[in-house]
Amino acid sequence: MSQELFRAAVLPMRDYLFSTARRILSEEDDAEDAVQEVLLKLWYIRDSLGTYDNVEAFVTTVTKNHCLDKLKVKKRTEGITDSVLVMQSDTTPYELTERSDTHAIIRRIIEQLPPLQREIIRMKDMEEYEVDEIADITGTKPDAVRMNLSRARKKVREEFLKWNSV
Amino acid sequence: MNWIRKITLVLVITGSAAALQAQSGLAIRKVFDTYGKSKDAVMVELSMDVLQGYDFALFKSITISNNEEAARLARDCIAIDEKDAKKVKQVVANGVPTSVYLQLPQRGKYFRLILYNHARQPESKVTLIYIETEQDSEDVLKLILKKK
Amino acid sequence: MKLRIRPTMDRAEIDALIERYYEGLTTVDEEKQLYTWLNHPSLKGEYEAERAMLGYFKGERPSVRLVSFQWWRQVAVVAVVALSGFVAVQVFTPPVQASYAYVNGAKITNPEQVRSKAMASLAGLPSSDALVDENLKNVSTEQLIESQLDVFAGME
């Protein structure tokens, strides 16, 4: 039932959500990422969508807030390179030495991925959603999902090789 | 090298066996492990006890004040454990969940719940609670969430 | 029939599959096959990144319910062997009687005090009524959001 609600009430709002995101974020790419992130977020909480009297209003508010948040993060991290972001880890060297396994490293790297890539890699590799399904949920084309997935996987490899050479 | 690593891991594990077994496989365990004994944190573990009129097999909670990094970790762990959840209730503000209630699938005879809240007023405080109970988790949730 | 991997031919196949993996083109079955291949002893020390990635996702999947990580399973066996009589990673074992609390790192074992700390943590959760109110509050701040948008519109 929650899947139907998601498709019937949330997905049709996509164009509206995109233009809303674009007004806040200016960049089309950022807006597109934001909309996909929001849709994936809403997909995960689809079971509770039915508890809201006005789903459309809720979805709109979530989108606006998500974009404002994204804008704040963007301003804060402007000028900081990716490699610095990865090294800003709350995992102490002691913890990593003690755990000392690739699992912890990979998890850390995934946590540091841009939100959309992180979510897509989780949906594909952990939840085993097909690329077509993810495209369906986010209202995009499978090629777009594949591109994000490809970027995410390559980034994980790149960062893993950096960590492993330390 | 491999067996040394394994023994080290064994020692780490057996040091926290009680907590381990209750939350084996749950990401939130990391929050308890990382912040349980730190400043500005209160961690509680109750076994086979009674609170507010309902009995439970395990009650484990942690509250952490004024620590955004802990809040972020808790949110990330919740997002992972959420994937297994049977039911999810959330309050979202500014695109970020401020309260999350997860009902996890039963493990044997135990119902399992995870409860998370991040309050910002009067100060930043993260509350994370894990419960194992033989009572129906729906009833337990209603009891916990009834108006105080 | 021996299942030994012949290095030259199958390595090309592995490399091709890995390339497709990084392009996001592999199916779930292909990735499972790749994982199996990469764990062959003859490839030890190579393809570290790919093995780590595929192994991680395999370990994190919800289907592996009771024990999340494979290394965990190995360690559990070692724990049982190395420390006899100790309760290892057994989910259905009755929980050990243990009530305690840590406040700012200091341990408390007095049952009444521990219980009151537990009650205090429950008080940190909003009631279900408060949950509904919070949602309504979010919806009604739409007007506030609108005025914020005007600020950003002026920044073009």
Image: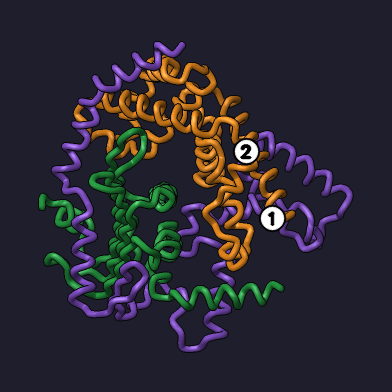
Chain colours: A orange, B green, C purple
Which amino acid type corresponds to the residue marked 2 in the rendered image? Answer: Asp
Give the quadrant of the N terminus of chain A.
Answer: top left
Q: Residues within 10 Å of mark 1 (few under 14, many from 20)?
A: few
x and y, in percent, of residue A116 in the image: 51, 33
Q: Which residue is mark 1?
A: C36
User: Helix, strand or loop at disc 1?
Assistant: helix
**Residue C37 visible in the shown view:** no
Say which residue appears at 30% left-offset and 70% top-offset. B45
Direction bottom: furthest residue: C85
Say which residue appears at 30% left-offset and 72% top-offset. C101
x and y, in percent, of residue B6 in the image: 62, 74
Direction right: furthest residue: C8
Q: Chain of mark 1?
A: C
Which numbered tag is attached to residue A75? none
Q: Which residue is mark 2?
A: A82
Say which residue appears at 54% left-offset and 78% top-offset. B11
Q: Is residue C118 left or right of residue C11?
A: left
Which quadrant of the figure has residue B60?
A: bottom left
Which amino acid type corresponds to the residue marked 1 in the rendered image? Answer: Thr
Q: Is residue C109 left or right of residue B17?
A: left
